[in-house]
Amino acid sequence: MEISIVHLQLLAAVLFALGLAAALGRRNLFFVLMGVELMLNAANLSFLAWSRTFPGRSALDGQVAPLFVIAVAAAEACVGLAMLMSVFRNRESLDTDDFSRMKE
Amino acid sequence: MIAQVYFGLFALVAVLCGATLVFARHPLNGAMALVGAMVSLSGIYALIQSPFLATLQVLVYAGAIMMLVVFVIMVLNTAKDSKTPGIDLVGILMSVVAFAFGLVFTGVLARTPVEARADSPRGTVQAIADTLFPVHGQSAWPLLFLAVGLVLLTAIVGAVLLSKRRLESPISVEDHA
């Protein structure tokens, strides 16, 4: 194995931080959704990298888990985009600052 | 050696694309950057002996999910919405918090002694199928696979219901004009 696990985990951490910054920092709903997608990708990379540190069949559990993450990400994107479309239809806006009715 | 060069290249592209996602003005630019990050992540998956996940990453993530996102961005055509400030004061604060979180995480990771094992199996289709649907012995994965099927079904029904204008209307887009 030539690529060190620590480097892979560092890359996953950096990508997770970038996704978190996009999800929390941006005001546009699209960027919030895509930031969540980037965080899920970073989690997948972390899963695969850790699975390289296990011997034998137990390593394959780390290879199967990202499969479920991808399926849940597909469901999340599907429902998230549908909600986004219905919100945009009602408010004509995608700015998260406009959606503060529950605060009042 | 050559694998490390490729890894550095893919990692650089992934991080640059992630940074573009944080700072892009228009959602389409962000979506394209995210596609770039996903494709380079797929290359990294292939480098760390997971050919099946690398294929799935391109097929499902970069192909299907991001296609859906780009499609919705184009349908909504939020050109006027791209005028909203990409990052304001709260955004800068949240980004600083996120990057501090990342720094703490990397600091912990950089001093963790972990080694890749030579006897770790490749994540081929055969190996993953044997894990997901074991012929011999007990495993929780088949049950989880059924649960994911239910989750996806619920998501489909939810998306259809959410995208209707009213629950009674048979077709949601007809009365738009």
Image (cartoon, rainbow, N blue to C red):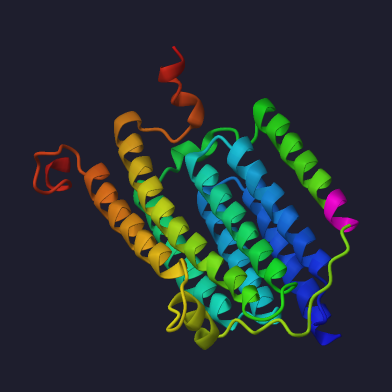
In the rendered view, tell whether residue A59 sits above or below residue B163: below
**What residue is at 48 percent from the left and 32 percent from the top?**
A95
Residue B134 location in percent, x, y? 45, 80
| Nearer the observer, A18 or B31 | A18
User: Magenta-highlighted stretch: main secondary structure?
Assistant: helix
Residue A38 visible to an observer of this rendering: yes
x, y (%) of residue B1? 86, 85
Q: Residue at x 34, y 51 (%)?
A: B75
- Give the camera-side residue of B139 and B176: B139
Outermost top residue: A104
> Which of the 4 image quarters holds residue B87?
top right
Examine the rendered structure and indicate whether residue B80 appears above or below residue B2: above
Residue B15, given in percent of the width and then of the height, sits at 73, 59
Residue A18 is left or right of residue B164, and the answer is: right
Nearer to the camera, B119 or B90: B119
Measured along the vertical axis of the image, is residue B157 above or below residue B3?
A: above
Tell me what residue is drawn at x 72 percent, y 72 percent. Answer: B10
Residue numbers of the magenta segment? B107-111
Q: Residue A43 sits in which quadrant?
A: bottom right
Q: Is residue B80 magenta?
A: no
Q: If the image is split into quadrants, where does the C terminus of chain B sit? A: top left
Q: Position of residue B135 (x, y in %)?
A: 42, 84
Residue located 50% across and 47% down the image: A33
